[in-house]
Amino acid sequence: MVSGESAADGGPGAAAVPRARGEWARHWRYDGLPGLDLLRARYVRHSFPRHAHDGYVVCAVTSGIEEVGLRQGTVRAGHGGIIMINPEVAHTARAGAPEGWTYATLYPSYELVAEIAEETTALRGTPGFDRTTAEEPQLGRMITEIHRAAETGNALAADSLLRTVVALLLRRYGGPLPARTPRTAGARTAARARTVLEERMADPPSLERLAQELGTSPFALLRAFKSAYGMPPHTWLTDARVRRARRLLEAGRTPADTAVAVGFTDQPHLNRHFTRIVGVPPGAYRRERSAQRRAVRPERL
């Protein structure tokens, strides 16, 4: 980092976690913005494996190029570009240029986006985005302003900007998401397989055993699951373990206990998969959440 570079200038700021040379990241929550996670980072060699999110992803690329791999192909965004990803959409992310990419990302929950859509748009059903990328330099600057306001504790500005940005994106690029109810026999089988894996996350069955329990063949299950969720069962399970690990870490569990609880062999395995998917190590993720809990704890009189 250049001396004097600050969060307001697009640099990492004091709370960012140093990573590989030239990389930094901060993944956190601000108490003044309920229903939202925040990530600001610069990645060069880091790449995100195929994964999905419970909520939405809205990021503004501030330098370099980000490549996002989706089922329908790869999209790229550079400075001034916005990337929008709907809940449960499997995707990858990596640098699209040798210098990597820097971005400010918002992870609004389904409930928050639905609330904003109901109040500010005429969308019916589950709101979502019809496009993955858009050239919106002004909205990109507003997204970085949300981060800046949160980092300085300005809840009024951060919340106002957040709702404005989401409302504008929904008006310009919004549409109803398709219903998630499984319609085909293959989709129903995939949903049943997902339920089994969620319930037996710490000790999952083999693919062959799972197929037998569901009354299908291993290859038929593989095809159905990938068609429904955009990734094979073992990749989905790793992602699901990391999602559950996030909730346990947020509740104060140690990384070592969390690794065992979600079914990873040991803490190093949790560290590797968690860092690849979330973008920061589990210890740093837990420290940010612990700091937030201390900040909102009422002072004893």
Image (tube, rainbow, N blue to C red):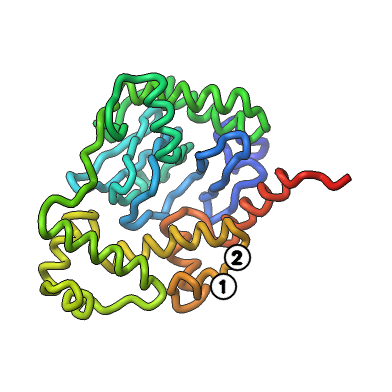
Quadrant occupied by the C terminus:
top right
SS category of the residue bearing label 2: loop
The three-letter amino acid code for the residue at tag 2 is Arg
Q: Which residue is mark 1?
A: 257
Which residue: 57% across, 73% down? Answer: 256
Which of 37 and 115 lies nearest the eye of the viewer? 115
Numbered label attached to residue 133: none
Which of 122 and 102 lies nearest the eye of the viewer? 122
Q: Position of residue 265 (x, y in %)?
A: 45, 78
SS category of the residue bearing label 1: helix
Give neighbour class at mark 2: few <14, some 14-19, many 20+ (Cα, 10 Å): some
Which of 110 and 69 lies nearest the eye of the viewer? 110
Q: Position of residue 282 (x, y in %)?
A: 54, 61
The three-letter amino acid code for the residue at tag 1 is Asp
Residue 247 falls left or right of residue 137: right
Judge whether residue 20 can be spotted in this image.
no
Q: Which residue is mark 2?
A: 253
